[in-house]
């Protein structure tokens, strides 16, 4: 039985740059062509798509979504184009995501930093951002490169700018120092700097190198190791616990019970990268079993498709995921 063919035409508004839509040397166009079995012809500002009726409609939808992103001021990238294609084709989509348009995901701008908009780059990241907005406590569990810390800091800075909270508190367990920071030389910030550097980097990018020290001096922004949270009640604050896989169950309970009125907490971690002493349980590994049924608490699991670093990093994460939880076997050295 012959496959029905169709032709779809897209007229690009004169206000839009064809280079911005198609990419330098047609790099974005080539990504679309390689993903679908359709012919794409570009003449002036008109795009003609020919092929099976299904593929032609899907390609047309991809270009429509990319145009909406451009109209909203979003600069396209290869990552954005790949993700738009994946969402249009439904690759890796959860059934609950049906009906959500790529432009609603990639165009959900949280903040502008250094002239660039910060927004979710995958469907998983969009679920994460929405969970932070709608929940009092949000857990994000996933591998490195999935935007767990970066998006949490961006959402926190936005909440501070909007006067939804009066201060930001960022913390993480200093496992490498055994939390015995008093034995390290220097001031508190000199002691914790190596452990807090990822948080500082994100804050510097989103607030500016000149603004951040002033915010810290006023106490509006606080970066401190988890051990310094004990005994406190944190009101009207946006609190981020990073590297939560390196907390013990007792530390996790201690942190969660610091939450005061008008506050919101985000807890991030990678359950596969635990640096605790051998045999010590991770607070992140048991918390979902304990808190899963509590209203106002959300759990978001990010995976290989949410990695937004180099494409090879996504491939590495997915390969390790396929490998599963088996222990790596190292061949013993040959006998002398």
Image: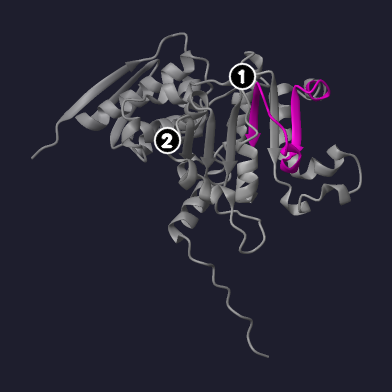
Circles 1 and 2, Cβ within 8 Å, touching? The answer is: no
According to the image, label 1 marks what residue?
159
Residue 333 % position (x, y)? 64, 81
Measured in 3D between alpha carbons, the distance from the residue under mark 1 to the one under mark 2, in whole angstroms, is 36 Å
Residue 28 % position (x, y)? 45, 30
Q: Nearer the viewer, residue 15 or 249?
A: 249
Magenta segment range? 215-242
Q: Is residue 102 left or right of residue 167?
A: left
Q: Does residue 127 sit above or below 279 in this rendering?
A: above
Residue 21 % position (x, y)? 46, 22
Residue 18 % position (x, y)? 46, 19
According to the image, label 2 marks what residue?
31
In the image as oriented, which residue stretches furthest toward the left? Answer: 1
Q: Is residue 242 visible?
A: no
Residue at 63%, 85% in the rendered image? 334
Q: Does residue 268 sit above or below 332 in this rendering?
A: above
Q: Is residue 152 visible?
A: yes
Image disc number at residue 45: none
Does the magenta portion include 226? Answer: yes
Q: Nearer the viewer, residue 115 or 214?
A: 214
Determine whether the residue tagged by mark 2 lies in a helix, strand or loop: helix
Assess disc 1: are there few (<14), some (14-19) or many (≥20) residues with their C-alpha within 10 Å of its C-alpha. some
């Amino acid at each position: 039985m012959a496959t029905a063919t169709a032709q779809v035409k897209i007229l690009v508004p004169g206000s839009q740059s064809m280079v911005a839509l198609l990419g330098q040397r047609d790099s974005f166009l080539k990504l679309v062509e390689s993903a679908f079995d359709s012919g794409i012809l570009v003449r002036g500002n008109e795009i003609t798509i020919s092929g099976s009726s299904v593929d032609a409609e899907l390609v047309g939808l991809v270009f429509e979504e990319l145009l909406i992103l451009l109209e909203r001021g979003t600069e396209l990238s290869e990552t954005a184009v790949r993700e738009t294609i994946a969402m249009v084709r439904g690759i890796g989509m959860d059934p609950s995501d049906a009906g959500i348009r790529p432009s609603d995901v990639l165009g959900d701008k949280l903040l502008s930093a250094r002239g660039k908009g910060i927004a979710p780059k995958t469907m998983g990241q969009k679920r994460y951002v929405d969970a932070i907005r709608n929940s009092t406590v949000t857990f994000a569990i996933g591998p490195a490169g999935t935007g767990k810390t970066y998006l949490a800091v961006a959402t926190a800075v936005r909440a501070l700018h909007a006067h939804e909270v009066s201060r930001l508190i960022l913390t993480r367990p200093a496992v490498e120092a055994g939390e015995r920071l008093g034995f390290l030389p220097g001031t508190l910030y000199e002691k914790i700097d190596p452990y807090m550097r990822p948080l500082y980097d994100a804050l510097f990018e989103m607030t500016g190198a000149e603004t951040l020290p002033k915010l810290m001096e006023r106490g509006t922004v606080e970066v401190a190791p988890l051990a310094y949270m004990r005994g406190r009640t944190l009101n009207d604050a946006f609190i981020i616990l990073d590297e939560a896989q390196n907390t013990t169950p007792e530390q996790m309970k201690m942190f969660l019970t610091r939450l005061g009125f008008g506050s919101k907490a985000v807890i991030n971690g990678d359950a596969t990268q635990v640096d605790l002493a051998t045999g010590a349980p991770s607070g992140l590994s048991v918390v979902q079993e304990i808190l899963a049924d509590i209203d106002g608490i959300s759990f978001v699991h990010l995976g290989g498709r949410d990695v937004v670093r180099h494409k090879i990093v996504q491939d590495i994460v997915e390969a390790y995921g396929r490998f599963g939880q088996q222990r790596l076997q190292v061949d013993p050295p040959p006998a002398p």
